[in-house]
């Protein structure tokens, strides 16, 4: 069952993505139609043919755009009235000129156009960037949600304008909306809204609603009505859910400043009426300035501008060793002086230390935690590869058990070797047609955890590790997964590898499926009284959860965690550099851990000391700080655009018959089996494409959804495998870089760095390619055609079966039977040369047939698909040998074809088995609930 709030949240968001209903697009379309209609009027006027019917047509378009135009400062409602007046007066030339000018400004600048249209007059002589307005000025909109009379609003606006005089850096306009409904729609469609001032007393419903949102918002408004919620609270709660980064201020008429409205801490500040425009102005500007502020980057700039002599071991600092060199001048020319001015090994002068931050880095991390909805955030400069190892070391001790998707990035597997934890590998569902894997089904996770419980091993299970979203864009439902697993083990920790998913926080539809949002929601839900009642009723119905028979039943029902026992311990690692504006290697760890101070803070510091360089690159740290600023202020707009762009690309490829004949972007029904798509969402585009309702339901409740910004292009019908298509077509001919390939696909990403221009360039390039291919095939001889068909068949119908995890050999299975493996013993056993031997694939097949146990000494990771088909201690199965034989990729880490497969000798296996019998896991202290002494295991 979906949470009702979640459904609404994705619902309003789905509107923004729906190509048909997207109100911003509708708005631009109406303006464009207006421009055409008005030009037609001009032509008619020249022939003296303007009738009142023609004018009515124009006025109807003004009426159509009006409900949404009211939610923007520019051109805005007042201008719309002026234009309508012009039409009524038949001033058609003037009208046409003005509409043309407005549409040009609007499509380029949206609400910021007001700066160019009017604001420039405020700063004559200021340098102007054609896209952004006066240099150094940041323009935004402050929404005033207040039903006051227009003349009162004008008074407030003039007061604010007056108070703003002299401010150049942060400049804003006030925009009045009069109801809860208008406020929510404005926040969704107007990206420039950065602050929201809400009056305590408001109507719920709009007098002129934007019709696209009516049906989605209605349940929310009805619910508010039924509960008698204060209107300002409804606005605040929803703004916090939809765009949590916006600053929220409450204006009350009570001198006690709406104290009960303040209890949820939704507002940043409460004002008594509009008593002091000056105070309101400085508060609004300060709120945005604070989000804009980048403590570490600011300190770095300051440092770079000071005269500093450098006798530290960093000759490149200040560029002296570069600019004084006869052979390195191009380095200086290429990078420019600032990078050298900002190079420092100092932690003084405001620069702080990444290893033990107390100043600007600490502050930057705290700001990032707020932006990403975490309780703590830590910056990492060696990529998420390192972030993952840090989290493993923080949460695990030798002998602890970890449930992990075998397809997780290799940093996890190596991290587990280092931590000495025992690994239980889980298989994700296969997507055989494209030789890739999806995610691990919740049922499989529950089954394994229950099996461990029934084997008496539950106490040792500490962590679950999953990738969300996966490389190919499959997104879990983390709240659902965590709640059900916490019902079986209430203090289980989770590491969600969000290497590819840092952008999701800024898009409500996707945010609900991030680890931090799920943790917050779980925290709110599981601690509430309503949940307690739900849990009690469920337990009364359900009875005990224990015993193998109960386990079978537990697989088929939704399990609820015990609110008195549950601990919420959630970690997420993100490669900020993969989806936001950070330099390569910039990564963040986000934490929501009820037991952080008690159980994790000290180990995390140690893990930092273990893995983080003592010379972190300041530019990387600064870029993390800056990436945070950007998404805090414009993440919503940029990520929304990335989604719109991805959907548009999907549409274009689908609609073009020639492109569609050879190239297809895989959709939900091809990547997510039906059983995991409870909503019934099949595809985002094409016949039977997702309705807004289906998209809403899918993101709110499906076990897995496909993120449409991950674009998997199926290339097999061109006769080229993914690798060949990437290198020969995309890179060589079109100069386009893509993410990765599978046997018959190429993965592309629509990130915030992709533009409409790059999209058309890609489409044109692909079209040109398939035109040539089509022409070639039309002239092909029968033999050439057979060859081509054979190539297509080889990469569509004749794919090698994907090998599942075969299991650990018993010598490395410390508590046999449940699939726990001791990677670390196997890994280090292979360090002695005499313990390993090499077998060719043919020899390996023969040995297996003869009944010999073959056990890998290594991680063997082919690229693609990029997951370990073998790990140290794993049994080599006939299926794996078969897969390796058919594997047609150049890069296989851990395997050199000329040497063969590295396996343990029989003696080494005997040695490992005898060691396993001798070595008992160390006695260790186990965490006990608050107030009870820790108990030895
Ligand atoms: C799922 C996943 N996690 C972690 C990483 C490692 O991230 P980084 O390159 O930032 O070290 C990758 C890299 O591709 C990845 O795909």
Image (spheres, rainbow, N blue to C red):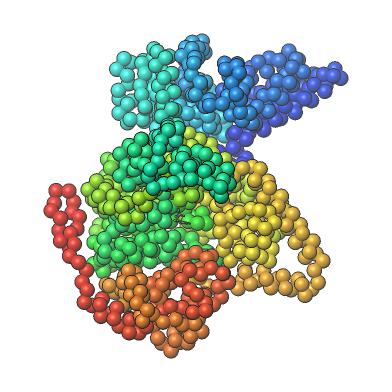
Residue 16 sits above or below residue 541 on the image = above
Of 821 and 129, nearer the camera is 129
Res. 666 visible in picture: no
| 784 relative position to 302: left or right | right
**Quarter of the C terminus within the rendering:** bottom left
Toward the viewer: 143 or 722? 722
The number of numbered discs placed on residues in the rendered structure image is 0
Residue 153 location in percent, x, y? 49, 14
Task: Give the residue at x 30% y 44%.
Answer: 356
Residue located 43% across and 18% down the image: 281
Left or right position of 775 against 354: right
In this view, 766 is above or below 795: above
**Residue drawn at (56%, 55%), measured in percent from left and top?**
739
Q: Position of residue 193 (x, y in %)?
A: 50, 28
Residue that sits furthest to the right in the current view: 47
Asked whether residue 803 appears in the rendered view, the answer is yes
Q: Quarter of the image holding residue 385?
A: bottom left
Position of residue 158 relative to residue 398, above or below, is above
- Where residue 487 sits: x, y (%)? 29, 55
Residue 327 image point, x, y percent: 56, 50
Compare residues 414 and 452 and report the one nearer the observer.
Answer: 414
Q: Residue at x 18, y 59 (%)?
A: 925
- The answer to which of 46 and 574 lies nearer the viewer is 574
């Amino acid at each position: 069952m979906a949470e009702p709030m979640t459904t609404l949240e994705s619902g309003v968001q789905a509107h923004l993505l729906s190509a048909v209903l997207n109100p911003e697009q509708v708005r631009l379309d109406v303006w464009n139609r207006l421009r055409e209609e008005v030009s037609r009027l001009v032509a008619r006027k020249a022939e003296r043919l303007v009738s009142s019917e023609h004018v009515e047509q124009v006025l109807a378009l003004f009426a159509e755009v009006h409900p949404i135009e009211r939610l923007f400062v520019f051109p805005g409602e007042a201008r719309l009235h002026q234009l309508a007046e012009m039409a009524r007066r038949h001033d058609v030339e003037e009208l046409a000129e003005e509409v043309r000018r407005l549409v040009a400004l609007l499509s380029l600048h949206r609400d910021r156009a007001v700066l160019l249209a009017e604001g420039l007059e405020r700063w004559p002589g200021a340098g102007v960037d054609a896209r952004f307005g006066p240099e150094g000025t940041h323009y935004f909109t402050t929404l005033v949600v207040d039903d006051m009379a227009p003349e009162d609003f004008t008074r407030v606006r003039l007061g604010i304008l007056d108070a703003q005089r002299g401010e150049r850096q942060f400049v804003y306009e006030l925009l009045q909306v009069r109801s809860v409904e208008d406020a929510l729609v404005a926040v969704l469609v107007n990206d420039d809204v950065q602050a929201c001032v809400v009056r305590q007393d408001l109507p719920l419903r709009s007098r002129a609603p934007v019709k696209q949102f009516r049906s989605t918002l209605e349940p929310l408004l009805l619910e508010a009505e039924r509960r008698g919620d204060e209107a300002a609270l409804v606005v605040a709660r929803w703004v916090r859910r939809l765009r949590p980064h916006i600053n929220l201020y409450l204006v009350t008429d009570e001198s006690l400043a709406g104290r009960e409205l303040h209890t949820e801490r939704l507002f940043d500040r409460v004002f008594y009426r509009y008593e002091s425009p000056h105070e309101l102005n400085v508060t609004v500007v300060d709120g945005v300035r604070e989000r804009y502020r980048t403590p570490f980057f600011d300190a770095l700039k300051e440092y770079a501008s000071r005269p500093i002599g450098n006798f530290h071991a960093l000759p490149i600092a200040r560029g002296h060793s570069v600019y004084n060199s006869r052979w390195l001048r191009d380095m200086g020319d290429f990078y420019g002086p600032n990078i050298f001015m900002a190079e420092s090994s100092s932690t003084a002068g405001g620069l702080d230390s990444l290893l033990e931050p107390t100043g600007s880095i600490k502050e930057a991390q705290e700001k990032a935690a707020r932006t990403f909805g975490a309780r703590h955030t830590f910056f990492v400069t060696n990529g998420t590869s390192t972030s993952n190892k840090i989290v493993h070391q923080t949460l695990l001790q030798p002998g602890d058990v970890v449930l992990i998707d075998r397809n997780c990035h290799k940093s996890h597997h190596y991290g587990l070797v280092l931590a000495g934890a025992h690994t239980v590998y889980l298989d994700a569902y296969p997507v055989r047609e494209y030789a890739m894997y999806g995610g691990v089904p919740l049922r499989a996770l529950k089954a394994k955890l229950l099996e461990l419980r029934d084997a008496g091993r539950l106490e040792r299970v500490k962590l679950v590790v999953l990738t969300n979203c996966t490389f190919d864009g499959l997104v879990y439902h983390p709240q659902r997964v965590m709640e059900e697993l916490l019902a079986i083990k209430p203090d289980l920790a989770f590491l969600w590898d969000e290497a590819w998913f840092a952008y999701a926080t800024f898009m409500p539809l996707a945010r609900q499926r991030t680890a931090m949002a799920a943790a917050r929601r779980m925290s709110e839900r599981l601690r509430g009284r309503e949940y307690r009642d739900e849990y009690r009723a469920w337990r009364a119905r359900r009875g005990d959860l224990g015993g193998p028979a109960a386990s079978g039943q537990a697989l088929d029902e939704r399990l609820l965690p015990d609110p008195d026992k549950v601990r919420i311990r959630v970690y997420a690692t993100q490669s900020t550099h993969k989806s936001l504006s950070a330099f390569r290697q910039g990564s963040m760890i986000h934490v929501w851990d009820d037991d952080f101070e008690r159980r994790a803070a000290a180990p995390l510091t140690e893990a930092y000391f273990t893995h983080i360089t003592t010379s972190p690159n300041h530019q990387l740290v600064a870029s993390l700080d800056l990436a945070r600023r950007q998404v805090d202020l414009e993440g919503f707009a940029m990520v929304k655009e990335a989604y719109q762009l991805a959907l548009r690309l999907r549409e274009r490829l689908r609609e073009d018959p020639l492109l569609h004949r050879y190239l297809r972007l895989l959709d939900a029904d091809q990547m997510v089996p039906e059983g995991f798509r409870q909503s019934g969402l099949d595809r985002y585009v094409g016949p039977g494409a997702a309705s807004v309702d289906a998209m809403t339901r899918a993101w709110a409740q499906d076990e897995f959804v496909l993120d449409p910004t991950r674009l998997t292009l199926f290339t097999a019908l061109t006769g080229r495998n993914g690798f060949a298509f990437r290198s020969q077509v995309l890179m060589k001919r079109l100069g386009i870089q893509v993410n990765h390939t599978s046997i018959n696909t190429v993965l592309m990403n629509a990130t915030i760095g992709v533009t409409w221009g790059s999209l058309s360039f890609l489409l044109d390039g692909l079209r040109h390619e398939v035109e040539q291919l089509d022409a070639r095939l039309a002239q092909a001889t029968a033999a050439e055609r057979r060859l081509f068909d054979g190539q297509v068949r080889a990469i569509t119908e004749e794919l090698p079966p994907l090998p599942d995890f075969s299991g650990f050999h018993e010598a490395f299975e410390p508590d046999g039977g449940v699939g726990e493996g001791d990677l670390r013993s196997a890994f280090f056993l292979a360090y002695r040369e005499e313990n390993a031997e090499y077998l060719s694939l043919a020899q390996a097949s023969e040995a297996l047939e003869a009944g010999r146990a073959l056990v890998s000494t290594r991680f063997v990771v082919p690229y693609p698909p990029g997951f370990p088909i073998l790990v140290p201690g794993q049994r080599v199965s006939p299926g794996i040998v078969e897969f390796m034989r058919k594997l047609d990729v150049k890069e296989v880490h851990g395997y050199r074809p000329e040497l063969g497969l590295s396996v343990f000798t029989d003696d080494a296996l005997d040695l490992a088995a005898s060691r396993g019998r001798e070595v008992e896991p160390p006695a260790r202290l186990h965490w006990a609930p608050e107030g009870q002494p820790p108990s030895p295991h």
